[in-house]
Amino acid sequence: MRLVLQRVSRAAVRRAHEIIAEIGPGLLILVGVGRTDADGEEAWLASKVATLRIFEDEQGRMNRSIQDTGGEVLVVPQFTLYGDARRGRRPSWDAAADPEVARERVETFARALEVHGLTVRRGAFQEHMEVELVNDGPVTILLDGRPLS
């Protein structure tokens, strides 16, 4: 799995110009699922996200996690994170998982975040969305699933 975490003041997802999910301060997470992702990555990544210290403490240092702040999470599926544009002028999506597999793994990841006590909202799957956010910082972190051996 591949994640793009953005620390936000607020974020929202629209489908057909109607808000389907929105959060206040917290994390917007774009989630891509790859064909070769290992079983168990969802739980490992959820634990990493829940405890990653990217929120400021009283001294302005990044010492607090999303769990510490009580912030919300907005999970947005995004297969384009596995686009490969190294050759030609149109990205290849060959590395992205099939939609049925990806849908299940994104939901498994979202549920794993909830196990950590986080409030999780969800974007739409396999639909055109408008994603609006106010990046706080800006803070943007890229996370790839760990190789499981």
Image (spheres, rainbow, N blue to C red):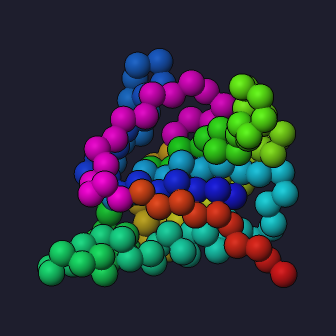
**Magenta span has 145?**
no
Say which quadrant the N terminus sits in.
bottom right
> Where, by quadrant of the figure, is residue 48 drawn?
bottom right
* Residue 124 can be seen in this image: yes
Rendering coords of residue 112 (x, y %): 59, 67
> Where, by quadrant of the figure, is residue 88 drawn?
top right
Q: Is residue 2 left or right of residue 50?
A: right
Residue appearing at x 45%, y 78% in the figure = 51
Residue placed most toward the observer, 2 or 41? 2
Q: Is residue 64 left or right of residue 20?
A: left
Residue appearing at x 42%, y 57% in the figure = 140
**Quick one: which residue is furthest to the top in this view?**
16
Which stretch is magenta?
Answer: 123-139
* Residue 104 can be seen in this image: no
Above or below, 48 relative to 73: below
Above or below, 12 relative to 135: above
Rendering coords of residue 9 (x, y %): 26, 51
Q: Is residue 137 left or right of residue 35?
A: left
Say which quadrant the C terminus sits in.
bottom right
**Quick one: which residue is furthest to the left in this view?**
58
Rendering coords of residue 146 (x, y %): 70, 73
Residue appearing at x 64%, y 63% in the figure = 144
Above or below, 40 relative to 83: below
Above or below, 42 relative to 64: above
Rendering coords of residue 79 (x, y %): 67, 40
